[in-house]
Image (cartoon, grey):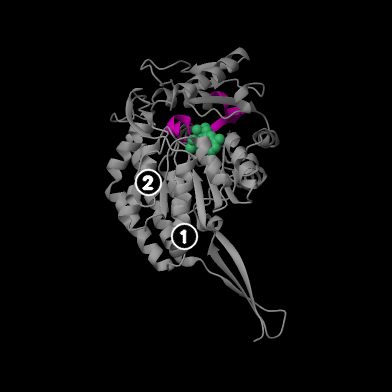
Amino acid sequence: MYIAGAWCDAQSGGTLDVDNPATGTAIGTIANGGAAETRRAIEAAHTAFLSFSKTTAGERAEMLRRLHQLILENQEELAQILTREQGKPLAEARGEIGMSAAYVLWFAEEARRVYGEIIPSPWHGRRLLATRQPVGVVGAITPWNFPSSMLARKIAPALAAGCTIVCKPATQTPYSGLAWGELCARAGFPAGVVNVITGSAREIGGELTSNPLVRKITFTGSTEVGKVLLAQAAGTVKKVSMELGGNAPFIVFDDADIDRAVEGGINAKFRNTGQTCVCTNRFYVQAGVYDEFVEKLSRATQKLRVGPGAEQGVELGPLIDSQSLGKVEELLADAVGKGGQVVTGGRRHELGGNFFEPTIIAEASAAMRFSREEIFGPLAPVFRFETEEEAVRLANDTEYGLACYFYTRDLGRAFRASEALDYGIVGVNEGLVTTEVAPFGGVKESGMGREGSRHGIEDYLEVKYVCMGGL
Ligand code: ADP
């Protein structure tokens, strides 16, 4: 672990194994840290905050620029680490590292644009100022599906704002998280500004959410764990940002460019083997183009190359672990039992291990579990609908509200539907929409707060009102 500018082991917890999901073999061990180490990291971050928060925006921007440069210089090695612990194809891993660098550069730039206000005073002899100050020590907990870029979205704005941070990467993918400690040290961030701890999620999460020195919790992961952290953070009234689960609908209207919709659908469904919170969970296709879409989507799906992420040309890696594989099988069996038709795939892949065939299920219905539950795997259910009103109603019929997609060539419909869909992110005729310059985040039980864009730094700042009297 990286605490207070030094590498250390767990005080008493020993180590945990980390596996390569493509082979099932152990690739190394990590420290099994707990509450004691977390406390030490929080205290180091608190001490560091006292001086780091006084640095100028220009100084922080300079360090972030160095960090950006270091990520790019080490892009290949970082991608190799990522693929080895996470399983995604190397091309996707390189892309993710590129995104991490892009977030860092973006927030290096935003650091210098944290403006305050002078408010016209309602009183004579007084001046009213609103300034923005860093919230303080941040606790960040991140998932295994984007082990590098999910931390980038938190570390970069936190540092840009002048906060210090204690990070806990997912136990399945800790090395990409630990790499941030090394890179931040090389970039010149003082000891204690960035700390990375690994080990027991429950203990580390418990300490981060209850320690009064932590002023903000930022979490990306499941809605279930997000709710636990929200409840825990309530005890000390911390600021919170939550990037939680999704149940993304992908609507194809009769008037859509079907080939484009198929291409977007493949990206939105199968990227990272379906393991992203913005991956399509439900395809809704209008009756007039249903058969054509299913046929073309199946054909494109059959062409996808499955294999170990480190192998050249592979497009779909393994699932992260056997539990995820089991869930995909369960959801599939449930759908088939309720009348779903497997058009493509439908089995564990012949490669064995955690590999599963990319699968299309036609004649999906609302009774099937995936109409409510996040699949997080390479399973694409295709539902049929008749009218625009029905599509929007079905798409909104979920407690989630992260990303949604729809395809149409009708301008009026593009505006109507994008306004009517209860989601934080809408892709119109696009299946891949994430970029560091745009706000990423959900509504309803998909969370609160936005990452990336100029809004991404807001969650790390508090507004302070200063009333100057006696002038
Ligand atoms: P996913 O389904 O993407 O694995 P999780 O919500 O299970 O999402 O995990 C996301 C992150 O939250 C991981 O770093 C995990 O270790 C951590 N985590 C899981 N349970 C808890 C908990 N009770 N308290 C704090 N962190 C937790």
Quickly name the residue at label 2. 2
Residue lying at 34% horizontally and 32% vertically, measured from the top left: 29
- Mark yes or no: residue 277 visible: no
Q: Secondary structure at mark 2?
A: strand
- The local crowd at label 2, few if under 14, some if 14 to 19, many if 20 or more residues have their Cα within 10 Å, is many
- Tell me what residue is drawn at x 48 percent, y 66 percent: 113
The amino acid marked with disc number 2 is Tyr
Determine the secondary structure under disc 1: helix
How far apart are the alpha carbons under marks 2 and 1?
Answer: 17 Å
- Asked whether, in this view, residue 199 is left or right of residue 287, the answer is left
* 25 horizontally vs 428: left or right: left
Q: Quadrant of the N terminus?
A: top left
Residue furthest toward the front? 12
Q: What is the crowding at mark 1: few (fewer than 14 residues within 10 Å), some, or many (at least 20)?
A: many
User: Against 185, is 22 above or below?
Assistant: above
Residue visible at 51% across and 66% down?
114
Q: Which residues are magenta?
A: 267-291
The residue carrying mark 1 is 49
Q: Is residue 88 above or below residue 56?
A: above
